[in-house]
Amino acid sequence: MDNGESSYRRLLAGDDDGLYEIICSYREGLTLYLNSFVQNIHIAEALAEDTFAELAIKCPKFSGKSSFKTWLYAIGRNITSKYLRKNSKLDIIPLESQEFLEDEESIEKNYIKNEQKQHVHQALHRLNPEYRQVLYLAYFEEFSNAETASVMNKSKRQIETLIYNAKKALKSELERSGFEYEE
Amino acid sequence: MKNNEEMYQSVLLRRAEYREKKNRRIIIIKRTVPAIACFCFAAVIGTVFHTAKLSRTPEQSDIIEDTTIKCTDAFTTCVSSTEVQTTMKNAAVTSDLSAASVHTTSKKATDTNRHQTTGTVVTDADSGVENVHTETNAVTSKPVHTNTNAKTSKPVRTNTTVRTEHKTTASTASATAPKTTKSTAVTEITATRTTRSPVVTQAVVDTTGYISPTVQPVYFYTVSDIVDAVERFFPQPIPQTTGTSVTASEHTEEVYSQMYSKIQNDGCIFAVRENDAVVPKDDFGFYLFPYARFEDIGVGGYAEFNGSLYNVTFYYTYRTPEDDDGIADYLHERMGRRCDEEIDINGHTVSICNSDDGRIYADFFIDECHYIEVAASVSEDEMCGFLNMLEYETINF
């Protein structure tokens, strides 16, 4: 049982500090993950807030079949999917998106300490959304293949194939930007 | 970008808003649902009661007062119309139900007959078209008016007129027979109650005297239908009601029962026999006339002679062989009819009566208990010619 699960139990018991602990533990990671869907850090932040509000208001049942983090990310993905379905015609990136980069970089620097990883994370934006998501979960959040499959609602075999293809795409993308890496 | 504390406060704020909305929704539901449920319940109950009230058949006892029967007598003119008006104290009575009730009453009384007419018969002698007219007015909290008209192509004569006035709740009835006159006599039966009692005064029957005129002739397609109906008739005891009054259905049943019993006891019916001159018009049908104030029990039909239509009716009387009065005396004593002339045709003394509308009536006994009446819009010579050629046959059971 990770800290998130115990905090959630406290939240269900009526202790709002549990919610605060969950937000502190997962806000940045969840926001960055959801940003891989929407490519807008502010929308991702709002979606992350929606995810926490879902926990606080509806108090969904946590069965414990997966880790709390996996479960929370799956909720966030579902909420984001709904958002994208509703706003499927509004996928035009606004001109002021450049301003978002600063916010994204700041949260990136806070959450991803390794500078090399930060370069890789920035390179992820130029990849296919599914490649972006699977690489973020597997390498930045360090989920196992099974957990990644659970969050993305895919089979383990599909995740393995996705990771393989995503790595190839990331490699070519990094080479194109002149990034040197060790084999 | 929000920090953790800001996001935490934001989430708490949204949760508080959600809970407040939820509480408001619960309050609205708690207030409105019982009211809506009560309204729906009342609506359902009201609908059920209303439906039950509509489907309730009015009972005989609901007919309580103010029965008025108007008759335009046409014995001499052969034009008769009868209107029956019944005031009912029943708010739930509908016009359909009233009509159904009237029809059921008549049918019950003559269940041995396959063919019958119901309602009041109105005959127009000139056109030969018969109108069956029954009118029922039900004055209730929701006034209902029923008017049913039926037309057939066969002329039928009804002789009904009595002036009766009821002024008590019981069955006291006094009848005043109209005087025989050449002009059309309009008489009226009015039953008025001073108290509202469920006892019906409309159909008070004095079986020893004259009978209420409401019972109508019964129509048959063929003579064999009449024979079949008479043979199948089995007299049943009529249930006795309290007091001296009977209901209309009981009265009708009794009159029809009396009619079938009489014909059955006599053991025969009569019909016009076809010959070279006289052709029975069987396609016009036949009528059984019940006993009435101005009508004996009889079997009526039509025959054609020299292009004219003759109405031939064989009547059954309650005379005994010892009664030696002639046909004219009998008709006068029995029904108050006049006799303009008596002639002898084929050994029969024929009573001739000319009505004001040009029709001529000829009556003569064929035996001690039966007589024939022929009515037509012809001259006396033509009538005599018809009577000379008239032959009839006796059909025994």
Image: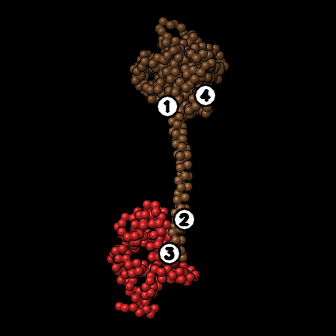
Chain colours: A red, B brown
Q: Are marks 3 and 2 in contact (CB under 8 Å)?
A: no
Q: Nearer the viewer, residue A163 or B64?
A: A163
Label 3 or label 2, whichever lies nearer to me, is 2
Q: Are marks 4 and 2 in contact (CB under 8 Å)?
A: no
The residue pinned by badge 1 equals B283
Label 3 or label 1, whichever lies nearer to me, is 3
How would you rate the neighbour count of disc 3 (Cα within 10 Å): few for under 14, some for 14-19, many for 20 or more?
A: many
**Residue A124, image x, y percentages:** 44, 83
Label 4 or label 2, whichever lies nearer to me, is 2
Label located before the other in sequence (1 or 4): 4
Q: CA distance from mark 3 to mark 2?
A: 19 Å
The residue pinned by badge 3 equals A44
Disc 3 marks a residue whose amino acid type is Ala
Residue at image position (39%, 72%) is A70
Disc 1 marks a residue whose amino acid type is Asp
Q: Secondary structure at mark 1?
A: helix
Q: Secondary structure at mark 3?
A: helix
**Residue B125, image x, y percentages:** 60, 27
Q: Are marks 1 and 4 in contact (CB under 8 Å)?
A: no
